[in-house]
Structures are given as C-alpha cells and as structure tokens.
Image (cartoon, helix red, strand yellow):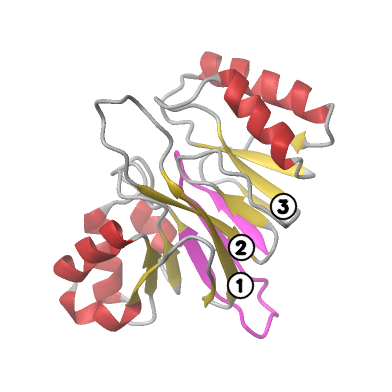
Amino acid sequence: MKLTKYTHACIRLDKNGGEKRGGALVIDPGTFSESAEALDGARAVLVTHEHHDHFDVAAVKSALIQNRELELFAPLGVADTMRREAADALSRIHTVEPGTSFEAAGFDVRSFGGQHALIHPHIPLVANIGYLVDGNVYHPGDSFIIPDGISVQTLLVPVHAPWNKVSEVVDFVIGVRAPRAFPIHDALLNSAGLDLVEGHVRRLGAKYGTAYEHLAARESVDL
C-alpha cells in the first residue's frame, strides 16, 4: 500500500492498483490539513477523536454528500455530529468502540484505546480511538496507547502536542518497537523544533530497532 502524509495528523492509505479490493482510506482529515485533497476519491474515512485538528466537519460533510461510496468510522461524538450534519449519509456513518474489528475500503481495521491523553485537569477528556490498518499501520490519534497482542509494522508518531513531551514520545516509540516510524501531529512545531524532536526519536528509537523517517506534507512512501 501507499501511505501519503498530509499536514499535521492526516494520512491517506491507497491499496496498490492491482489489488482486488483496492481503495483509499483517510485518517484524521482535520482543519490543519489538506482535508478535501486527502478525501478526494476515498472510500473510507477514520476519525480518532472530535478535536478540529483531526476532524474537519465541513470537509467531511462535503465529502460524504458528494461521494456516495464514502463511509465514516469514528467514536460516538464524531459520528453523532456527522449524523446531524449529513442526514442523507446515515447508513454510511458508523460508531467505533475500542477493541473491535471491521473492514473499511478493503482494509482490515482494528481499534484500540478509548480515551484522549490528558491535556489539563480543567480540560474535559474526550473519546479517542487508535486504528491499526491491515495489521501494518498504526495511527494512535491523540494518545500513546500501545496495541496489545500484535506487532505493529509502521508506527505514526505524534511528535508534538499540548498533551505530550519528548520523553513520552520516545518511550512510545520504544514501547511499540515497530520496524518503521513516521511523524504525525507536527503542525505546532517550526522547522528547528521539529528537527530537535525528530533527532531524539531517530537516535533513541534506532537503539530499539525502529527506523524513524521524516515525511513532509504530501510526501508518500510505499509500505
């Protein structure tokens, strides 16, 4: 499959053209991302949680209305929002609970976690679902939940957020121990800050068998 990174936390996965169940799946098209571009022609969109940097209501609504093949999979709060916004697409909007498995756009998906990482005690917690796609790519959303009982092959790493610090980012990479890792959740850093954080992740992750690679917005890699 091909993985394309968009700005911040949004990624798109495309099945190889020759695969029988070929399709495109998008995770977390938010307001910081090129959401309309990422969603163009997709058959499924997965949203980890309701924060706007992961869930662009207007873009997802437009995509659901224009593309009758597109299905949405998300926690209850996100799913209910889209049921109100795109009533004509009710049959294509699915609520996801932690610890479940389903198929989306020809991809096998498993869900993990359930709760957003703590930002501050005065800021309410929201539901957060991490997604493992085709037993390969793991997008944790805004959490450091490590999938249990499986070996992740490709880890998407939230490198910077109001809820994390560098030591936690490194420990997440070490804990998952995926052979490959790429950045997400990086829009709040300038180039100097990104270089600093990625340097730590690359150097320390390598000690535990993880090859961390930078991906810029709109850059793709074959998995």
Q: Dot 3, how many residues are within 10 Å of its Cα: few (below 14), some (14-19), or many (20+)? A: many
- Give x and y (percent) for residue 219: 59, 45
Between marks 2 and 3, how big is the CA–CA gap?
A: 10 Å
Q: Mark 3 points at which residue?
A: 152
Kindly identify the residue that appears in the image at 63 percent across and 45 percent down: 146
Determine whether label 1 and label 3 are within 8 Å by CB: no
Q: Which of disc 3 and disc 2 is earlier in sequence?
A: 2
Mark 3 lies on a secondary structure that is: loop
Q: In this view, does 23 lie above or below 126?
A: below
Determine whether label 1 and label 2 are within 8 Å by CB: yes
Q: What residue type is labelled 1?
A: Asp
Q: What residue type is labelled 3?
A: Val
Q: Which amino acid does label 2 sit on?
A: Val
Q: Dot 2, how many residues are within 10 Å of its Cα: few (below 14), some (14-19), or many (20+)? A: many
Q: Which of disc 2 and disc 1 is earlier in sequence?
A: 1
In the visual, does 168 lie left or right of 83? right
Q: Is 205 one of the magenta-colored residues?
A: no
Between marks 1 and 3, how big is the CA–CA gap?
A: 14 Å
Q: Is residue 202 above or below residue 35?
A: above
Q: In which quarter of the image is residue 76?
A: bottom left
Q: In which quarter of the image is residue 58?
A: bottom left
Mark 2 lies on a secondary structure that is: strand
Q: Name the residue under label 2.
A: 133
Q: Name the residue under label 1.
A: 108
